[in-house]
Image (cartoon, coloured by chain):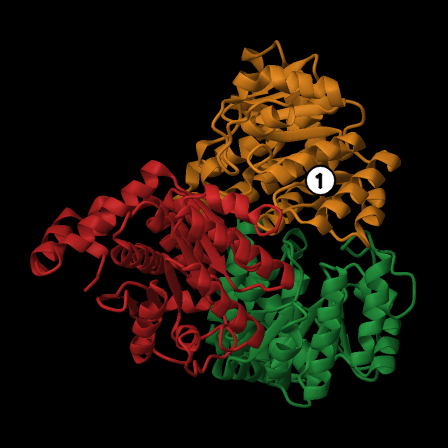
Chain colours: A orange, B red, C green
Amino acid sequence: MNEAATEATTMRTDAPDHRREAWATLQAVRDSGPLVHSVTNLVVTNLTANVLLALGASPAMVENIEEAGELAAAAGALVINLGSMSAARTEAMHAAALAADRAGTPWVLDPVAVGALSYRTGVARELLAHRPTAIRGNASEIASLAGGDGGGKGVDSTLDSGAVLDAARRLARDTGAVVAVTGRIDRVTDGDRTLAVENGHVLQTRVTGMGCSATAVIAACLAVSGPARLAATAYALALFGFSAERAARGAEGPASFQAGLIDSLYGLTEAQVLAGVRIR
Amino acid sequence: MNEAATEATTMRTDAPDHRREAWATLQAVRDSGPLVHSVTNLVVTNLTANVLLALGASPAMVENIEEAGELAAAAGALVINLGSMSAARTEAMHAAALAADRAGTPWVLDPVAVGALSYRTGVARELLAHRPTAIRGNASEIASLAGGDGGGKGVDSTLDSGAVLDAARRLARDTGAVVAVTGRIDRVTDGDRTLAVENGHVLQTRVTGMGCSATAVIAACLAVSGPARLAATAYALALFGFSAERAARGAEGPASFQAGLIDSLYGLTEAQVLAGVRIR
Amino acid sequence: MNEAATEATTMRTDAPDHRREAWATLQAVRDSGPLVHSVTNLVVTNLTANVLLALGASPAMVENIEEAGELAAAAGALVINLGSMSAARTEAMHAAALAADRAGTPWVLDPVAVGALSYRTGVARELLAHRPTAIRGNASEIASLAGGDGGGKGVDSTLDSGAVLDAARRLARDTGAVVAVTGRIDRVTDGDRTLAVENGHVLQTRVTGMGCSATAVIAACLAVSGPARLAATAYALALFGFSAERAARGAEGPASFQAGLIDSLYGLTEAQVLAGVRIR
């Protein structure tokens, strides 16, 4: 593994820092165990919590109006995921995002199925007023949130991440958020600079909650990253995607792949990260 | 595997078409990836989504009144599962079922614990007005929904599927739905014809959401089946039950069995289906 | 395995009954399959149901006001877990706990994140009026519920179980409940006698819902234990913790550990339990 790492570092002298800093970000999460508050959907609560625990963070899922703001103000980072909606959840999402914005807590918006369903498309646009630190979605969701035609089918995208890069940049400039469009290649932009993350595996499309989990990993990395938010978002996606690649090697299908991804994320070593992260 | 398939086909010349058509149904799901909208319970959302993804379908879980009807009208099939109830969910279930009925979207009712709990027993009967395409339950649930004494204990049945076949036939004739009673042997009837599916494994009784998952697989198969709804329902149960049999071989307990079932469903080959499906 | 069992029994002649009775308790759960009603949080519903099924119990998750009291009165035991709150859930929790108290159904309170969040801290104190049979929490939660400063961070404790033993004893005497403080060593007290359970594994801190699952196992054991509630609570924790130890041996990370725990719990043999349970 050390040999491979050395070779890879040698061959890509143009961007050696990304790998070292991705590893440093992972170490910071493991060392400080940031509390990540998720207001997320009913399908992925368990998976999201387990991904955060495997990463070294401390997850808390609280989505009621009585408590969402209190926890968001105390947390290291917040996730607002639109996968499950209701009038009560919308109210709690606003309370949590408002509290995060006021407290300076970084927060990430995951606009699940925005564009495909009218109600949540409206809610997502309103939530932008609370100034998300980052937004992660597939190409259809990001295009829709930026104001275009996303062409989504339910929660799955019919577009490629590269095709909506202009919309992502515009959304980033309009909101001040880092915008991540995930797909075969993930594109991360602050409206000015753009990074491409080439980690990941096609089996991620056959397991529910992979995008939602990536969003939670972004939140954990933002909790420890300080001002380098563009880079931290890309590192989160690379660490998650690389864990997926490693899990796919031993998988017999989507279920063993999902378990392997969590086990892999938990055990990531410096040598593996230095050899595996692909950001340009 | 090819030898076994040939032998099995030879030995059961009375019904060779079921196996070929079960395979054709699976191929159609994989090829078209139908959007399956589930209003389902809080225990099984993640499992149901992953079963549908492993099968090749595209799952979406939406259960709020603001969006349930909009999605049901656009989906390839709909599941209404009564495992988690509330006044708000009941309202969303009605909206989704009504939209499905109007749009001609096939929809499947899963009357979890009907008979054991009064409120949902009433809701289940009211939902029949929206003309479900299929109904899947255990023997207690089907007997209760048909108007008899189901003798259920919580969500588990104390009856055998064969013992309630008359009630199932009556329910099918009264509602126009295909009715599936799952158990050691699954019975599927349209009130006139009846098919028996002999696939499955006893470990399915030690994992939560196996019935709910089977219901979701039925919905996916109905999305691609056209008018052959009796057969499509039986094929869904056979494909799911056969995947369970294959998973049981390598399982060390219920958790590895569940993961193996999803992996098996994802990887099913033509030779396996032709050798393994048992319908009469 | 028999050799190890014999040796272990020989070496600890001071408390041989705990192991034999822990095994008898597990057998009673497997033989009678008690219906365990859980009003639990959205993160752990699936895991809790699967742990109960692996143990041999029959889980039912019902949390709406229309049905919670009806099911609690019919169940063998009830779990009230505060991990997900809302005004509607609080109402259902009260209805279920009241019905359990009136029907003589044993019920277990799991005060998730009590102390860290104000609303649920108030709800937890009000629920004590319905006389829980047992209360299980981490050190922070138990200290907070007993009226002290719990020092919790989100849902994770920053205290050791031994440090809050006085608070646990006071809470037990004030409420009449058996109080279990789980951690590296679990302490179980009725206010007078105290047992220490030394089973468990550190990987339990990297999987969500381990405490919630332990609470559900306590409920199942209380459903079959009669008046020996202190011992039954300790046996539940020992059986669960020992299954965790066995799972950790073959685990490659938190996900394979979780699956292994369920498989291990399902397959526990007499020889394993007699050799593995450590209670003093």
Under mark 1, the amino acid is: Val
Q: Which residue is mark 1?
A: A79
* Residue in the image at 49% along x and 60% along y: B81
Query: Does residue B27 show up?
Result: yes
Report the side of C78 relative to B269 (left or right). Answer: right
C77 or B174, which is in the foreground?
B174
Identify whether C74 is placed above or below A202.
below
* Residue in the image at 15% along x and 53% along y: B17
Q: Which quadrant, please, contains the C terminus of chain B?
A: bottom left
Residue B113 location, x and y as percent? Answer: 50, 72
Q: Residue furthest right?
A: C148
Is disc 1 placed on a helix, strand or loop?
A: strand
Residue A1 location, x and y as percent? Answer: 52, 28
Report the side of B153 relative to C172 (left or right). Answer: left
Residue A46 location, x and y as percent? Answer: 61, 52
Q: Would you call the spot at circle 1 few (<14 residues within 10 Å), some (14-19), or many (20 or more)?
A: many
Query: Does residue C163 show up?
Result: no
